[in-house]
Amino acid sequence: MRWTHLIADLSAQLDADDRAVRDADVAELTRAFAGGSTLVDRLRSAAGHEVTLHVCAGDPVTGRVEDVAREWVLLSVAGHQVVVPLHAVDHVRGLGPGSAGPVDGVASRLSLGHVLRGLARDRTVVHVRTRHTSLAGRVERVGADHLDLVAAPAWGERGGPDGALRTVVPVGAVVLVADQVR
């Protein structure tokens, strides 16, 4: 009887030690996985859910995450679509603890320049918020680090040769681009 209790006690201690080692390994692997995740991975895990992006200028932007690439996040906000460059995000509210794994493919490699050139091609009227102002017009041209936004001239103002007012905006100054004037 004494041997039975001794063996049972040793077996229980060994099981407890095995569980502790396994729990420590799981915790370490979880920390390592989290340490390799990016903001893009976290935002991708929130696809279809609402988040609030506090950006470097102006009011926060709250909307449903529609798409995420390495340089930007697309939100659906009250029937409008808003592209927010990740360089303009100060902090995010509403993200869960999950993280989507890295993804390869064309969509993940689309830069902000690709999105802006698509807007220029479609001649979409947009609202562009920068760090210091808000502008409205059509993206006419996209360079390596800037875009030309063209708006019809206001009364008494002179535009370029075609009568349009052209504003050149450094891409690094862009805080958000909305698909319609808001």
Image (spheres, rainbow, N blue to C red):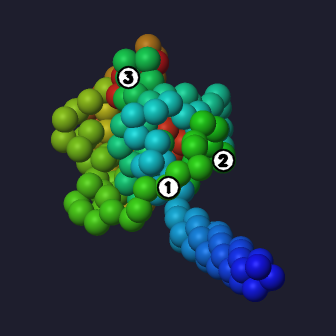
Check disc 1 and report its element: helix, strand or loop: loop
| Mark 3 or mark 2, earlier in chain | 3
Q: Is residue 19 left or right of residue 113?
A: right
Q: Residue at x 50, y 30 (%)?
A: 50
User: Label 2 to label 1, Cα distance in Å?
Assistant: 19 Å
Sequence-wise, the earlier of marks 1 and 3 is: 3
Residue 77 placement, left or right of 143: right
**Residue that numbered label 3 is attached to:** 80
Residue identified by numbered label 2: 90
Which element carries disc 2, helix, strand or loop?
strand
Observer able to see residue 171: no
Task: State the separation of the CA atoms marked 1 and 3.
Answer: 26 Å
Find residue 123 and report its horizontal and vertical position in percent. Answer: 22, 33
Question: Nearest the camera: 22 or 5?
Answer: 5
Residue name at image x 19 percent, y 41 percent: 121
Give the mark toward the camera: 2 or 1. 1
154 to the left or right of 6? left
Picture coordinates of residue 133 (x, y %)? 59, 33
| The label number, if any, that marks residue 99 in the structure image | 1
Q: Secondary structure at mark 3?
A: strand
